[in-house]
Amino acid sequence: MKASHRLATFAAPLLLLMPLLLSCYTKRPVDMSVVRADSTASRDRIAEVTLVDGREIKFDDMPRPGILGDTLRGFVHTGPVQVPLDSVQRIWFAKLSPGRTALAVVGSVVAVAGVAALVALASKQSCPFIYSWDGKRYVFDAEPYGGAITRGLERDDYGELPSLVADHGVYRLMVTNEVNETQYTNQLQLLVVDHAAGTTIKPDEFGRFYAFDSLAAPTSARDADGRDLRPWLAASDHLVWEPVVPPDSTHSARQEITLTFAKPPAATHAFLVARVATGLWGSQMIRAFSQLRGTSLNEWYAAMDTSPTNAAALRAWDLREELYALKLAVEEPAGWEVRGVLPGGGPFLAADRVVPLDVSHARGDSLRIRIRPPYGFWALNSFAIAWRTAGDVHITTINPATARTSDGRNVLPELARADNRYYAMPNSGDYGYVTFAAPPQAAGTTRTVFAHTRGYYRLHIDPTTPPDSVTLARFFAVPDAAARFAAAQYARSHPRVAMAH
């Protein structure tokens, strides 16, 4: 099977389907067939493409690049170029709209080989978007609490806001609902870290922060077929490894990727820093899995919301299946041992997460880590390792000063603390503005700011069919049954990919 087929991802362009959407700076997957067919795509400037071989092409602003047939045509600094679409893995759109004074550069995973997709507005099934004011416009910076699809699964999220700057002593955020769901944000605060230049600050999923002055990329990254993935996984850039073609009856439901890092012989602990996201197809499967519950969906919500035992059982199943949480296995003399878990996130922004690892049983001068992501459920951007931290991290917590919806309603009490009050956004297109007093920055330091959010969301589903109890029971009884169900759904939606496979 061609690598281009493995790298194909399909989703309808949310950007093109929402005429009131603010402009923003984001990475959002779209379907190449929609780019070709939808005339509104011409309003979005193609800024850059990533090819399936890992090369990047950045286009001049004028004349604007465009798609003609199966070819992308544009100009670069050396002159005109023509790029066959079946060589393209991602298209990065630039969009500047009026409306809410925000800028978007949209990183778009394209459907290679001209495959048509049948996915519409449901291309994203998780969480609000948070935009940071960069002094001129709002920029898409965070996508919190992905996968928390009911109150019993409510969780905290820690997302870096790299675009945020203080404007006359004030930090400004915009929070939006851009999908078919109701979002409930319980708390929103800023965590400000002033640290020495040359160090980076990264969080784990539990809100612990780490300072690093040295991060090392893998010396090797290969899949089970021996394919060299290091060019895709060694740096945080526009190269995102996201193969989504489903397995056939002779193929595993999972990839298997082994990362190798140089290891000090006496090291007993390590810190893996991974930049990953939920895959687009995996995001869409959240809705598909929910729809299988049919008329019993509300009963299932109630069971999750009222019973911590039920919620814990669901999380344990998810970890077994590794759909939205990924096991990190370390090679030891006795074999592969799971020493950490990498959490998932939203599908549009890859986020950094630290996972401390016990490597005391690993031998030699190399550390080998194995991951086994199910096809379609993970988008992998980069992995790095640190063998020490660079001292303690001192955090200043800032609660919001003001919080108002687009129609002027005060929602500050709903966001001020984690309690039973929520800022609810029930409609796609809802948005609000939150401000914070920026503290003085310590002299001689670099500042990194994170959004600490807590919340959940409910998909807008009105099921009228009976529950598919047979399929649901199989999910829990048979390992990888959910991943194979997702693969079958993908094959039905993308028959030409299935035929090629």
Image: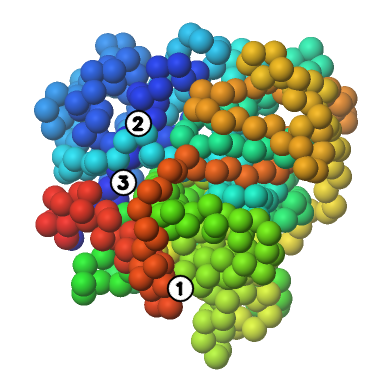
Mark 2 vs 1, N-terminal side: 2
Amino acid at dot 2: Pro
Which residue position holds label 3?
9
Task: Give coordinates of residue 109: x percent, y percent.
Answer: 34, 39
* Location of residue 451 (image quadrant): top right
Image disc number at residue 476? 1
On screen, residue 218 versus residue 163, left or right, reads: left
Identify the disc placed on residue 13: 2
Q: Amino acid at mark 3?
A: Thr
Asked if 143 appears above or below 378 in the picture, the reply is above
122 or 310, nearer to the observer: 310
Foreground mark, 1 or 3? Answer: 1
Q: Residue at x 55, y 43 (%)?
A: 458
Q: Position of residue 60 (x, y in %)?
A: 33, 18
Query: In the displayed structure, does residue 181 sit left or right of residue 445?
Result: left
- Nearest to viewer (mark 2 / mark 1): 1
Residue farthest to the top? 98
Q: Amino acid at mark 1?
A: Phe
